[in-house]
Amino acid sequence: MAYKKGIVFTTLITGFILSLFLCLFYRLDLSNGEIILSYIRVPAVIKAIISGSCLSLAGMFLQTISKNPLADPYLTGLSSGAGFGIVISLLFFNSVNYSLFGFFGALFAAALVIILSGFSKFSITKLILIGLSVNLFTGALISFLILLNPLKSYAMTLILTGGFSSADVSSKVLVSLFISAIILCGLFVPKLNAMRLDNRLIFNSGTKVNLYNIVFIILAAFLTSISVYCAGILGFAGIICPLLTKLLLGNDSRVLFFANILTGSTLLLFSNFLAANIIYPLEVPLGVVVAIVGVPFFVYFLLKKGGILNNQD
Amino acid sequence: MHDNKLSVILGLNGAGKSTLIKIITGNIKTEIHTKNTFKKVFYLPQNPYYPKGITSFDYLSSVFFKNNWKWFLSKEEKQKIIDVLEKIGLSDKKNINIENLSGGEIQKLNIALGLLSGADLFLLDEPSSNMDLINHIKILKMLKSLTSQNITSVIIMHDLNLALKYGDMFIGITKDKKIVQCGVKEFFSRENLKRIFDIDFKILEDGNNIYVQNID
Amino acid sequence: MFKILINILIFSLFFCSSVSAKEPSFASLIPAITEIMYAIDAQDMLKAVSSTCDFPQEAKKKPVIGDVFFINETLLLKIKPEYFLALDTSEFIINKYKRFGIKPVCLKFSDVNSIYDNILLLGALTQKKENAQKLVSNLKEKITLAKKSNKNPDKKILYVISVQPFRTIGGKSFITSVIEASGNHSVTGNLDTFYPVISLEYVINQKPDIVLVDCNCSDDLYIKKIFPDTKIVKMTKEQADIINRPSVRVHKSVEFFAQLGNK
């Protein structure tokens, strides 16, 4: 066993609660406490928890089914789809609902990639390559649109790096989306325990492997779109959280499900806290902080217990 | 396929042994209609991938999550896993992570996956491709003993003498892509081996046992 | 042979300098600089402008050489102005035209006084020193007048550039100095940056008296929610243009800020 599960979970839960309290109550000016809590801190906390758990769950699904530790939630063309949606909304609809545009952009891109890769015989390698092509193609379009509109380019670049600043996102919609996604995941997660075996293994008659692969890819795309809706494009969290939990807790997807929700939300809560306070009153882009917080942790555990991740002996 | 027998597929590299197995599993569609009298098929590919960071018990439990909507294993299923571990002689390594097991032990676990899935036709693509002789023999012995439990095995392998010792039926693929299926005596005739492997063999008979050796 | 070459060289040098002595030519990349050129009556020397130069109206009729991000190089080399006017932030872009004989002139606008300096500098370059001096003294007068019109000075003003993410002006922005010149204060004036992304909580805790929202910002509802008891003023496009340009209309900008507390 990698570590005792009890110890790992206690640490995770403590970390989660600590960062939650830091995010909510650190340096809270009581005279404006109500406004600050209800319009700034609570929405940010909700967004951090939702986007963190969505990203790391999506990463876990994709890493398990592709058996590739490098798979990340934006694999299926999601990031560029979301970015394209955001840029379009900022340019032509004047920014009011850019998160919603990002959400639908991401869903659309994911659907496109999944349909394209399923045309003849579905395979994960094909999905990754088609996702990559869509990412590159849309990425080029985004750069073109940004360059064409120099006046808004700074704002667009800032928004594309991700963060919880979007004001229009309704917490109710977000929470209901998240809960429905989590229930769906809860139904399918134990199946990942079978999916972790070699794809070519056939048992129980019939080849349902590809069907489940597609189900998990769709679930991952849905989760990632939710995270795009609340936090824009946050790279990295979706790669390291699943890897970290796998290093700490082994490969049982039922355990990893909860561990990922905790790790993802803790990482983003803590990053959010740092982003707001590290050079207060200025703010650091959240994506930058996530990388700065996450990478040292991750590298430490990688050096210590990296053997588990090798595919070949 | 002959029921409850250990069939061995022999042939040169590229002759189409794996393709033959894939046709049987239905992975490759052909115009030949295969009539399947078996309930369930278990196919073990060459050098299968295995996930790290789980115990051998967890590894075997993977099978039960495939078709059921549940979070926990039932008591019966747990008992089944323990029984199977007992059968393959790994019950003392129940809680050891599979990346710490030897190649032979992992291959035994893979066969145990087939046992747990309840399949009665095992298709194994070179199950002992990079194993030492002892493990090789252990696995073949295990599969042989399974035939007494109504499990039919079809194995691709290259070692003629081991195939001779443990195989009941032999399927050869000749150079002109013809399939020969026959028993021991018929298969290990000089003419037949020449057709399949394109070199001459010396066949030694020693009571009930037959040995082959190539002639330079 | 060698002598002839030297002669040609000397002749061409002489020719060039005599031409430039007559009337230097300019290209401007920044609307504020274009405005100054018109104000000191040097518009004839301005041979090319940027696509963002829209004041005064006649400036739009000049040849357009692009903007800070894309410069139409063929057109620029065809016009071949002697001086290329831009801000210090785009120095690296225009420096590369040095080898074509186009001299980069990078102006720095850090506060109201730098506007005067830059007007005088442009006056010297265009040989319209008198016009420039007259303009500067005129501006100074108007600004003092504008400051006097501020009946309720020392208001705390929050200037919002965008809400998602929340950007405002820092102490290095010249707008801060314009606000100071009007007798009011910018709540974020003590920050040592230009246009920072800033923590919303910080500005709420500063309790600004007036929230000034940029015309491009479209989240008025949200601002109303977080500043329920504060006066919120939304700028028009024209006002925003005047405020954002460190040019000869700066007295109007000072006036605008001075009037904010009065209404």
Image (spheres, rainbow, N blue to C red):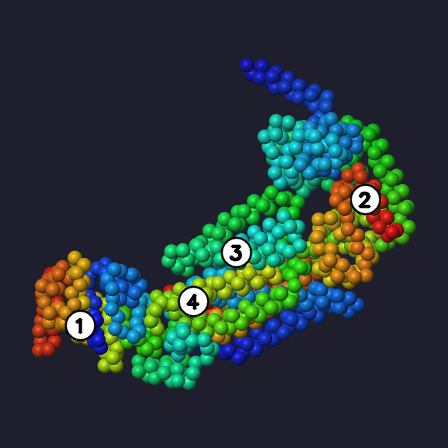
Q: Chain of mark 4?
A: A
The first of marks 4 and 3 along the sequence is 3
Three-letter amino acid code of the residue under disc 2:
Ser
Q: Secondary structure at mark 1?
A: strand
Q: Could you confirm whether marks 1 and 2 are on the same chain?
A: no
Callout 2 touching callout 4 (CB < 8 Å): no
Three-letter amino acid code of the residue under disc 3:
Phe
Q: CA distance from mark 4 to mark 1?
A: 37 Å
Q: Secondary structure at mark 3?
A: helix
Q: Nearer the viewer, residue A54 or B94?
A: A54
> Residue C253 got which mark?
2
Compared with B137, A109 (above or below) is above
Q: Position of residue A309 (x, y in %)?
A: 44, 66
Q: CA distance from mark 1 to mark 3?
A: 55 Å
Q: Which residue is mark 3?
A: A108
Q: Which residue is mark 1?
A: B169
- Which mark's residue is nearer the viewer, 4 or 1? 4
Graded by Cα atoms within 10 Å as few (under 14), some (14 to 19) or many (20 or more), the crowding at tag 2 reads many
Q: Could you confirm whether marks 2 and 3 are on the same chain?
A: no
Residue at 68 percent of width and 68 percent of height = A42
Q: Could you confirm whether marks 4 and 3 are on the same chain?
A: yes
Callout 4 touching callout 3 (CB < 8 Å): no
Q: Which residue is mark 4?
A: A212
Note whether residue A38 is visible.
Answer: yes
Graded by Cα atoms within 10 Å as few (under 14), some (14 to 19) or many (20 or more), the crowding at tag 3 reads some
Q: Could you confirm whether marks 2 and 4 are on the same chain?
A: no
Q: Chain of mark 3?
A: A
Residue at 49 percent of width and 50 percent of height = A136
Q: Position of residue C94 (x, y in %)?
A: 64, 36
